[in-house]
Image (cartoon, rainbow, N blue to C red):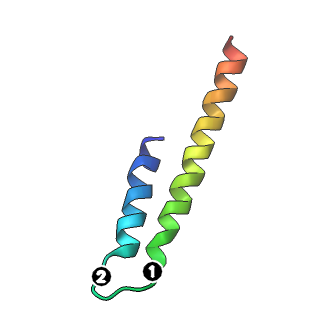
Amino acid sequence: MAVAAILMPAGFFGASAGRGRTEPNTLLALVYVGGALLAAGVSSLGVGLLTVG
């Protein structure tokens, strides 16, 4: 989950950086990758909590 906390803001600011930019660039994909990693981490945490308890 710690990687998601780095990838999502990096993708957001990286995609919006640049002079006169009106559309995001390909770094926007980092936001989706970070979101997928966050969802996987939260899901594995939930499964772990349910199986241990």
Which of the 4 quarters of the picture holds residue 32?
bottom right
In the image, residue 48 sits, relative to residue 35, either above or below, namely above
Q: Name the residue under label 1.
A: 25
Report the residue at 42% width, 56% height from top. Answer: 7
- Residue ranking furthest to the right: 51
Report the residue at 32% width, 76% height from top. Answer: 17
Which of the 4 quarters of the picture holds residue 40?
top right
Which of the 4 quarters of the picture holds residue 38?
top right
Determine crowd level at label 2: few under 14, some 14-19, many 20+ residues with C-alpha closer than 10 A: few
Report the residue at 60% width, 29% height from top. Answer: 45
Tags 1 and 2 in contact by the CB under 8 Å rule? Answer: yes
Distance between mark 1 and mark 2 Cα atoms: 10 Å
Residue 29's x, y, as percent?
52, 69
- Residue ranking furthest to the bottom: 20
Q: Which amino acid does label 1 sit on?
A: Asn
Q: Which amino acid does label 2 sit on?
A: Gly
Q: How many dots with numbers?
A: 2
Residue 4's x, y, as percent?
46, 49
- Residue ranking furthest to the left: 19
Residue 48's x, y, as percent?
65, 24
Label 2, secondary structure: give it. Answer: loop
Question: Relative to the observer, which residue lies in front, 9 or 30?
Answer: 9
Report the residue at 48% width, 78% height from top. Answer: 26
In the image, residue 50 sits, relative to residue 44, either above or below, namely above
Q: Which of marks 1 and 2 is nearer the N terminus?
A: 2
Residue 10's x, y, as percent?
37, 61
Label 1, secondary structure: give it. Answer: loop
Horizontal side of 31 relative to 18 (left or right) equals right
Q: For the C terminus, give its image quadrant.
A: top right
Q: Residue 5 carries which label?
A: none
Q: Name the residue under label 2.
A: 18
